[in-house]
Amino acid sequence: MTKVAVVFAEGFEEIEALSPVDVFRRSGFDCSMLGLESTSVIGSHGIQVAMDGVFDGNFADYDLVVLPGGMPGSTNLRDNETLIASLQEAAKAGKYVAAICAAPIVLERAGLLEGRKFTCFPGVEEQIASGDHQTDLVVVDGNIVTSRGAGTALAFAYALVDLLGGEGQQLAHTMVYDRLFQ
């Protein structure tokens, strides 16, 4: 079974975290919501969310690690040395590492955007020196996946499901997402 870790830090963007969790679970993936430091985390809009567990510094059992954006959530993720080292190990092992909105600053800190295409929330690219900024809604470059923000959270999640061998586009149809663009 496909295993996904979504890492939540205080101040995470709720839509960017919970929309992918919902899509992953609808897809039959084993999706763990991991608090960076606690089993209860409060988002940037004051929504408190109970976690499945606490990040233990190890992504070896996961196929994908997802980093939601939001402020100060993204900086809290970026400033956690254990997370940075674990992301480097996961990427080196060929696991997918994905970040949305401001969270690509975490990938930058981990050295994972060097020579890669990426996207992020408008203006955040000014904090990222090593990658090739794109304006697409979702950018896939090898095992690194990025997206722009809250409004692209579902597109991000469907793309990740497809990358992991699921049926993201079929789920988008089932959830009436594809009809938004007709």
Image (tube, helix red, strand yellow):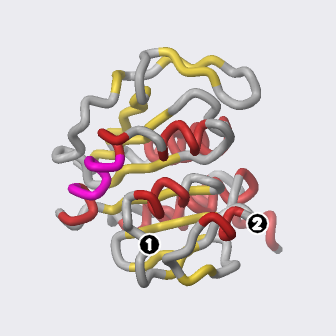
> The C terminus is located in which quarter?
bottom right
How many residues crowd mark 1 within 10 Å: few (<14), some (14–19), many (20+)? many
- Above or below, 138 against 105 in this view is below
Name the image quarter holding residue 28: top left
Q: Is residue 132 above or below residue 99?
A: below
Q: Position of residue 61 (x, y in %)?
A: 18, 44
Residue 106 lies in the magenta stretch: no
Q: Is residue 82 left or right of residue 93?
A: right
Q: Which residue is disc 1 drawn over?
A: 113
Residue 33 in the image: x percent, y percent?
Answer: 42, 31
Among the two numbered marks 1 and 2 on one chain, the one whose residue lies closer to the N terminus = 1
Is 88 one of the magenta-colored residues?
Answer: yes
Q: Cα distance, mark 1 to mark 2? A: 17 Å
Q: Which mark is residue 34?
A: none
Relative side of 152 to 31, left or right: right
Q: In this view of the protein, which residue sits in the foreground, 165 or 122? A: 122
Comparing 182 with 85, the one in front is: 85
Q: Residue at x 38, y 66 (%)?
A: 111
Q: Amino acid at mark 1?
A: Leu
Please provide the residue range marked out in magenta: 84-89
Residue beneath label 2, please? 122
Element carrying mark 2: loop
**Residue 144 appears left or right of 76:** left
> Identity of the amino acid at label 2?
Pro
